[in-house]
Image (cartoon, rainbow, N blue to C red):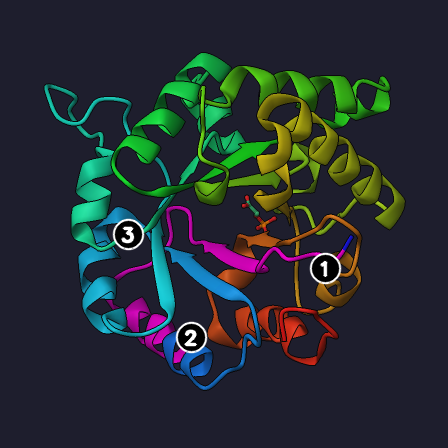
Amino acid sequence: MPNRRRPLVAGNWKMNGLSASLAEIAAIRDAVAAGEAGVAEVVLCPPASLLMAAATLCAGTSLELGGQDCHAASCGAHTGDIAAEMLKDAGASYVIVGHSERRADHGETDSIVRAKAAAGLRAGLSIILCVGETGAERAAGGALQKVGGQLARSLPQDAPAGRLVIAYEPVWAIGTGITPTSGDVAAMHGFLRGQLEHHLGKGAAQVRILYGGSVNPANAAELLRIADVDGALVGGASLKATEFLPIARVYCSRDNDLN
Ligand code: PGA
């Protein structure tokens, strides 16, 4: 069956970036506008402190913006948190939920992630829902079980497939320079597609499944050609336009029936 999903390359800046970094966003914006990402959709998730300024830079262009996390509530007494509605208001169209760093650093459980995902959808955002096993879980042969369980417990009921993106990010591959084998990525993404069919029925074919974890210009072409890999969630390599753009450029040269 032909792949009719539009590829997505998303950059997650994490807790990096000061106002001087807006120059990188402008450079990425200009390259995307010049067609350097081919058919791919490109989203940058800067820290919340840069979101409104980035939105001003990107207004009317095809470079989209996202938040890195949101609270489950739309407003209230939650010091330091940010609501999905605030991200939308600041110019975001996406929000990442359930990143393994949030799960580890802030004790986010699958049910918290599910509430955050529902909040993002409620605010009109598309969500990038992250799942992934630890190195110990993979070594013990439990990777599929772990990821399948995370998906089942963190997927909101009646999630609209068109606004749902899953990011498979093995925890042991994030920021380490190590990536799984192509075979392991293919097996996990195929498994996730099957799980999505189970949860969402026919809509599953619309859901994009990204790979994340040490994606860089040298390994992007190989990772992004794997079946059921519909794009990438890029951390460290998204901070510099000169590293991020070659990843998006994979979709320029690619035979793609979206062309
Ligand atoms: P990395 O991070 O590309 O720096 O490994 C990916 C992520 O955590 O989203």
Q: Residue furthest right?
A: 183
Q: Which amino acid type corresponds to the residue marked 2 in the rendered image?
A: Ile
Total numbered labels: 3
Q: Quadrant of the C terminus?
A: bottom right
- Callout 3 secondary element: loop
Residue at 70% x, 32% y: name it.
192
Badge 3 crowding class, 10 Å Cα cut-off, few under 14, some 14 to 19, many 20 or more, is: many
Element marked by disc 2: helix
Q: Which mark is residue 94?
A: none
Q: Which span of residues is magenta-colored?
A: 2-28
Which disc, if any, is residue 92?
Answer: 3
Q: Is residue 8 above or below residue 100?
A: below
Identify the image quadrant of residue 108: top left
Location of residue 225 by image quarter: bottom right
Q: Dot 1: what SS?
A: helix
Whole-angstrom CA distance, mark 1 to mark 2, is 20 Å
Q: Is residue 19 one of those drawn in magenta? A: yes
> Residue 43 appears in which quarter of the rendering?
bottom left
> Where is residue 242 drawn, in percent x and y?
53, 77
Q: Amino acid at mark 1?
A: Leu
| Residue 133 visible at all | no
Q: Earlier in the sequence, mark 1 or mark 3?
A: 3
Mark 3 and mark 2: Cα distance apart in space = 16 Å
Q: Classify mark 2 as within 8 Å of ligand 1 or not, answering yes or no.
A: no
